[in-house]
Amino acid sequence: MSLLHHPTCRRCFNQTLIGAAAATPLAAFFGRPAVAQSTQDAQPVGAPAVSHGHKAETAADALQSKPPIDAMSEFLNGFHFYADDIGRQVEANHFCTHLSEDFHQCIIFDSNQSNAKLIGIEYIVSERIFKSLPDEEKRLWHSHDYEVKSGELIAPALSGSAELAVMKDLVSTYGKTWHTWQIDRHPDFPMGIPQLMMGFTKDGQVNQQMVQNRDKRFGVNTPALGRGRDNIPRPNNDPGANSWQSGTTVQLFLREVQVKNLRTWQDPSPR
């Protein structure tokens, strides 16, 4: 059974993992403090929360349903770099929902702790969907085969065979990633505009100290994980992905533009 299962079955992913192998408890799978320490000791932006704010959060937690959050059934840890600067690299903790057999959506945090900072989003599609995209759209996407085969991408706290099942499903997928918080330059506040991110495609690209720090926190060994994935077939990547490898890429920049339809939406009535 594929781990990319029916969009209305948020528990199917975990059921599949249990069928593949005995996984660790779900609390650990979702990256709570027992799994590992955060990427950094993330501090809240601005002043400490006051008591009435905490009470409001507690009431909301008790009374409000959160279907989109409850549907997140996968925790992945990996690394991204800014599409126009491979020297700017960050660790990314993904919490993902499977909307369909071919489509994941993930929110990305700088750590896996309760005070983590939301730094971006990633959409993940199957090889079938990616190949159907227009060429210009493909330039925004990166492949996942190297991340999987090298051991760089992990699913923390899963048993070896359960994690292997996850990686077999991910190896042929593609991701489009936008980081909304340039955490490497502005750790205290989300300054600036969203940036397109990419994934690594061969040895020697990722900062090894960053990988070692991650491995120590999660109790894993990236090279050993890579060797354990030797039997996962490597797909033939679509040449439209990983556009940065050509030496040029696309990126977002601010520029001033005219506001359209302004007259239509102005209120002509006297004040």
Image (cartoon, rainbow, N blue to C red):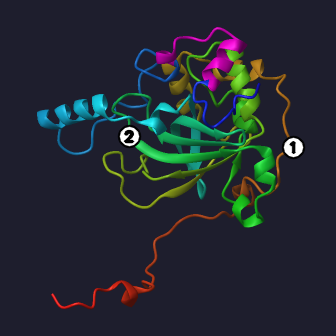
Where in the figure is residue 38, as x and y percent of width and height? 41, 27
Indicate left or right for 120 with 85 as reference. Answer: left
Label 1 or label 2, whichever comes before in sequence order = 2
Q: Give the class, few, some or many, for how many residues have Cα within 10 Å of label 2's Cα (few <14, many ≥20).
A: many
Would you name the residue on which mark 1 appears? 236
Q: Does residue 95 appear to the left or right of 64 in the view shown?
A: right
Q: Residue at x 46, y 36 (%)?
A: 67
Task: Give x and y (percent) for residue 147.
Answer: 69, 35
Image coords of residue 128 (percent x, y): 81, 47
Expressed as whole percent of the image width and height from the top left, the position of residue 222 reads 65, 23
* Disc 1 from disc 2: Cα separation: 35 Å
Give the overall secondary structure of the magenta segment: helix
Q: What amino acid is at disc 1?
A: Asn
Nearest the camera: 72 or 201?
72
Which stretch did the figure color magenta? 12-28
Question: What is the number of the mark on residue 117?
Answer: 2
